[in-house]
Image (cartoon, grey):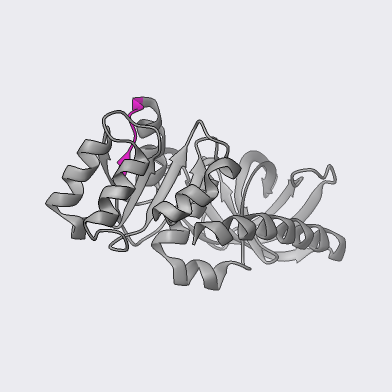
């Protein structure tokens, strides 16, 4: 969830609320964020230093020049392909504009209703395509509550991603590497309580309370065959959904 390889992302959106929300997610994940309030400012930023942009997140509905206008200008001036472009929309249904966005030259599309972990999944698809391809079958984003026990103390946190061999636990509690932990949670659309035992392999910064995605990477040490089957089935469904989206994003 949190990357050690910082990238510079140009975020173009006329909504202060959305710029703030999305920049918080991106900066907490370890990236630098620059802003543009409309298409005119996007063009100015690109013209000044295109090599200083690793990813453009581009709202399709903006004043002055909209996202499609920016893509048209980029194509006419040879900037398409210099860095990936992730289009965002809060108005259109994705099925309505898939072909138009792809034809215009965007590398990806997402709606403004995505969760933080889904946003980062798509951002990192474009920033680190080789790594994401290698790890595509290793984990999927998820956002579900989890009860976990360390010793005789029980806490509540959230799962931000999961795999057949482990998960990322978002929590305000400080967990040390090597800590044995027991977890209980349910996956979306399935009420069964999954129980696993694991060990903390790594943690985020020393003060997780300041981290939007603070927490720990957990490696499973015990999970029943039935529960592992449920995890794999959930992953297959999610990867199919995300994979279908990737077919038009690339």
Relative to residue 156, is residue 82 depicted above or below? Answer: below
Q: Position of residue 123 (x, y in %)?
A: 44, 53
Q: Position of residue 172 (x, y in %)?
A: 51, 40
Q: Is residue 208 left or right of residue 97?
A: left
Q: Is residue 199 magenta?
A: no
Image quadrant assignment for residue 147: top right
Q: Position of residue 47 (x, y in %)?
A: 15, 50
Q: Position of residue 134 (x, y in %)?
A: 54, 73
The mark total stands at 0
Observer-nearest of 18 and 6: 18
Image quadrant assignment for residue 53: bottom left
Q: Is residue 6 left or right of residue 114?
A: left
Residue under the point 32% across and 63% down? 81
Q: Is residue 13 magenta?
A: yes
- Note whether residue 204 is visible: no
Relative to residue 26, is residue 231 depicted above or below? Answer: below
Residue under the point 47% across and 60% down? 125
Residue under the point 61% across and 62% down? 139
- Note whether residue 3 is visible: yes
Residue under the point 33% across and 26% down? 16
Image quadrant assignment for residue 241: bottom right
Going by the picture, which residue comes out furthest to the left? 48
Q: Which residues are magenta?
A: 11-16
Q: Is residue 157 left or right of residue 84?
A: right
Observer-nearest of 9 and 85: 85
């Amino acid at each position: 969830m949190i990357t050690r390889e910082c990238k510079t992302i140009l975020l173009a959106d006329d909504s202060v609320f959305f710029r703030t929300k999305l920049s918080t997610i991106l900066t907490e994940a370890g990236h630098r964020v620059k802003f543009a309030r409309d298409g005119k400012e996007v063009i100015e930023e690109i013209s000044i230093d295109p090599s200083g942009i690793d990813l453009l997140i581009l709202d399709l509905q903006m004043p002055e020049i909209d996202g499609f206008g920016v893509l048209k200008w980029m194509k006419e001036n040879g900037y398409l392909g210099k860095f990936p472009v992730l289009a965002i929309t809060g108005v259109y249904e994705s099925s309505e504009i898939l072909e138009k966005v792809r034809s215009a030259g965007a590398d990806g599309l997402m709606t403004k209703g995505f969760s933080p972990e889904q946003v980062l999944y798509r951002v990192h698809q474009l920033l680190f395509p080789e790594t994401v391809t290698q790890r595509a079958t290793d984990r999927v984003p998820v956002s579900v509550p989890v009860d976990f026990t360390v010793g005789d103390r029980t806490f509540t946190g959230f799962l931000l991603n999961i795999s057949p061999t482990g998960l990322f636990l978002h929590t305000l509690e400080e967990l040390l590497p090597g800590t044995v932990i027991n977890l209980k949670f349910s996956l979306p659309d399935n009420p069964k309580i999954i129980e696993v035992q694991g060990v903390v392999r790594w943690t985020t910064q020393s003060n997780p309370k300041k981290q939007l995605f603070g927490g720990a990477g957990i490696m499973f040490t015990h999970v029943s065959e039935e529960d592992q089957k449920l995890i794999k089935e959930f992953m297959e469904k999610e990867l199919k959904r995300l994979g279908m989206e990737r077919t038009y994003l690339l």
